[in-house]
Amino acid sequence: THFGFRDVPVGDKQKLVGEVFTSVAGKYDLMNDAMSLGIHRAWKRYFVATAQARKGDRVLDLAGGTGDIAALLKERVGDTGEVVLGDINAAMLRAGRDRMTDRGLVRGLDYVQCNAEALPFPDASFDLVTIAFGLRNVTDKDAALREMLRVLKVGGQARVLEFSQVTAEWFRPIYDFHSFKVLPALGKLFAGDADSYQYLAESIRKHPPQDELKAMMERAGFARCGYKNLSAGIVAVHTGYKA
Ligand code: SAM
């Protein structure tokens, strides 16, 4: 296509999610900062800084959106490494490529429009596969996890950064108020779209909590699965390896 993305057919089920992100793609970064008071940047930095990556590695960032994770990953893999940013949504992918170019990042980057459930890559093609704030939106999460495992090299690591279950009891009412009152209001204010942010809050509540996601990764075939809570479990970093 004009943008050089490799197009892969995307299922009907994914279209709704696609539309939600198309409606917010432009304001996406601003919204992330507003919703999380900028804390999402610290979560992302931790997620990438503690990932298993070396200079020269070939890494895949799924649901890569506007490229925050991909940009951090590029620093880790260096000039000789390669980062592939995959996203199901062409508008997000375009925003991601523009943002990466603005950051001065051009070489060693590739953009692929793809559904995490059916990856257009051969087996054992990456040293590291990441998905940040993306698994939640995937319809068949088990399929996505199996695909992540398939495209990993033996010894490679998969990492999931996702909203999870808040562990501190006292914090829950505050968090719920933020999710169901503040979020949709911010969505309306910044993006003229409360519905997308209502959807966001609901999708966070429906996402499997820490131990359930860990079990799903084990079932998908990952070895040495574990997780770490950040900010009292607002998000969790899950890790698994291809043995
Ligand atoms: N990883 C980025 C970040 O942390 O800022 C973007 C996260 S954004 C909340 C979720 C992204 O997932 C969107 O760009 C959306 O297009 C993408 N997405 C949703 N479903 C997907 C799927 N099945 N396969 C690949 N990407 C998907």
Image (tube, grey):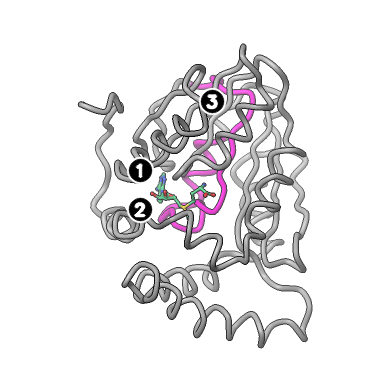
Dot 3 corresponds to which residue?
83
Q: Earlier in the sequence, mark 3 or mark 1?
A: 3
- Tag in front: 3 or 1: 3
Foreground pick, 213 / 2: 2
Please check the rendered image and state whether residue 192 is part of the magenta-colored stretch, yes or no: no
Local packing at callout 3 (Cα closer than 10 Å; few below 14, some 14-19, many 20+) is many
Q: On screen, 237 above or below 55? A: below
Dot 2 corresponds to which residue?
26
Q: Identify the residue at horizontal 28%, vertical 33% (top origin).
A: 8
Q: Which of marks 1 and 2 is nearer the N terminus?
A: 2
Dot 1 corresponds to which residue?
88
Mark 2 vs ligand 1: CB below 8 Å: no
| Residue type at the position of mark 3 | Val
Local packing at callout 2 (Cα closer than 10 Å; few below 14, some 14-19, many 20+) is some
Distance between the alpha carbons at the discs numbered 1 and 2: 16 Å
Q: Quarter of the image for the N terminus: give it.
A: top left
Distance between the alpha carbons at the discs numbered 3 and 1: 17 Å
Span colored in magenta: 123-148
Foreground pick, 165 / 66: 66
| Residue type at the position of mark 2 | Gly
Foreground pick, 192 / 156: 192
Q: Residue 40's x, y, as percent?
A: 63, 57
- Tag in front: 1 or 2: 2
Please check the rendered image and state whether residue 135 is part of the magenta-colored stretch, yes or no: yes
Mark 1 vs ligand 1: CB below 8 Å: yes
Where, by quadrant of the figure, is residue 224 drawn? Answer: top right
Instruction: Please report contact status of discs 3 and 2: CB closer than 8 Å, yes or no.
Output: no
Instruction: Please report contact status of discs 1 and 2: CB closer than 8 Å, yes or no.
Output: no
Q: Which of marks 3 and 2 is nearer the N terminus?
A: 2
Q: Residue 120's x, y, as percent?
A: 38, 28
In the image, is 205 to the left or to the right of 122? right
